Image (spheres, rainbow, N blue to C red):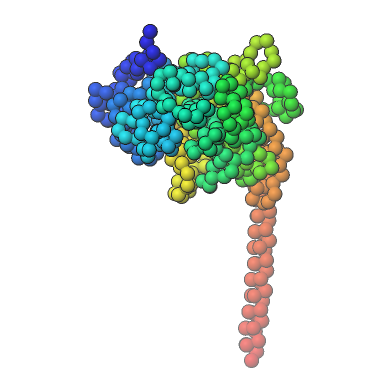
Amino acid sequence: MPTDIELGERRMDRRVSFIDRITSTRGARTSPRVNTFASIASARERTGEGQVITSLSPLTDDERQRQDCLLALIVGDNLIKGSLADACIWYSRFLRHKFLSHWHLLAPTLVGLEDDSTGPRSGDLVIIYNFAITVARLLKTQSSLALAEIVDGLENEQQLKQQLDSERALHNQAVFAAVGWLTMLYEAVNKPEVDKLEITRTSTASSGRRNILTTRKIRNHSQGFDHVDRSLDYLLSKFGELIPGPKVSNPTELSDVTESASEAINVQTLCFNTLNNVVEVKIEWVTSHALHLEFDSGKKTLKLFQYPSFARIMTEAKKNGLLSNETRVFNDHAAANCEDVQTPEVPASEYFEEILLSYRLIFGLDEKSWRSFSRIMTAMEEQEVSGDLPFVWDPLLHTLCGKSASSEEAQRIYDDIEASESAKTYPYAEFPFFGKRLIALQEFVKQHQPQNVRSLLNDRRDVAAWYTLWNNQILVFFATFTIFLMLLSLIFQVWQVMLAKQQLEQGNH
């Protein structure tokens, strides 16, 4: 029986003709090994396409092959083209940067790496890719998988070094970090405490500044190893609500439904221009898609997932990708929290499609919104931001948030995911996963009253009222201007009378 790794290699071989076409059409030279995701990336860099996140050393042939096998497991049996190719290029670099930032954790954990090394030597990434492939394969195929079972699987394949402590702390921490990279349910701390599993507690403001993360979804940011032998959904539940629940296509299914939930989701109410200039809501970028669209009414901050490239990859993996309908983590969580006889499935591809469509809703359908975001991004990229800057700003954010939804680049993405046509309003059913959060945000915006003249003039939630206000402003302006002209004419007449009087007095003398 062929292993999953071998099957991944066979799937990559079937892509040869497509990769050859995509590189040759871009004017890049092909070689006998132009059959990898990395080849697309290097070809686009040579032809000036895409965005080079930061300099990385070239991969060896073996490292490139392992990278391709990992991405094949994640994406599934899909041709890598268009926006999916762009997303895969970004994600492959994302993984390599995570390997580097967690090197001090991986080196003493994986067989074949030197304990005291400070970075990978040529060929070392083969070991890490094999490690990630095993983790991804187990996530994809095993039900009710526990962190300890992943460690056991790696030990059975002799990928992990022997550890003296009974809790296998380094092993658990390394695997926990890898699960985070592969699912983006959380971001693991790269230097955790010796006896802890920790997730990051920072977000990124639109100014580029790193902030302390405040969220209702995460109750704890660290825990010990007490639950590593329980299923992953149970382990993650000890941090908080990190796994999405089943979709709710009808708002009446919500136990805490409000009357406003039956309303349509309005673009003009939820666009960035209204949120920022009228309600003064600030965007907070987060690395966990579980926090996407969470709104803090007290601080007036709206959290948005900052890695749309990952969401784009997941929308493609509908049948046999890492987080496809058959994936275990999402559905294990649904089963554990469902009291019905029939457990609802969580179609992960639809979940990630909603994330992509929410960027269109907030930014892409309103010109002032996407132009404003584009200016913010330009200003931030000129600043030096501390931390893992290359992956704070996913290049796909430029397309989805900084360009019109009708632009060629954005439309290509929406066509690829077979998105519905753009509209001014959407029914709740269009956002069965995130509709509740969107409705809550919309209700807050509707109840908000502008606090200053600038906010009042930018308030286009009620278009008829906005036009009436501006018409009144124009009438006031013309009335004021007319009064000014009348006063100026009066002053001129008085001046003429005084001048005539002065000339008359001089004539009498």
Q: In the rendered view of the protein, which quadrant contains the N terminus?
A: top left
Measured as percent of width and height from the top left, residue 387 is found at: 47, 44
In the rendered structure, the answer to whether residue 299 lies left or right of residue 95 reads right
Frontmost residue, 145 versus 10: 145
Frontmost residue, 72 versus 195: 195
**Residue at the top extreme of this rendering:** 1
Measured as percent of width and height from the top left, residue 139 is found at: 49, 20
Compared with residue 236, is residue 120 higher up or lower down, i.e. above or below? below
Total tally of numbered discs in the picture: 0
Q: In the rendered view of the protein, which quadrant contains the C terminus?
A: bottom right
Compared with residue 136, is residue 292 higher up or lower down, i.e. above or below? below
The residue under the point 59% across, 18% down is: 332
The residue under the point 44% across, 21% down is: 154
Frontmost residue, 161 versus 367: 161
Compared with residue 235, is residue 462 higher up or lower down, i.e. above or below? below
Measured as percent of width and height from the top left, residue 157 is found at: 40, 19
The residue under the point 34% across, 30% down is: 124
**Residue at the bottom extreme of this rendering:** 509
Residue 454 appearing in the image? yes
Q: State which quadrant residue 39 falls in.
A: top left
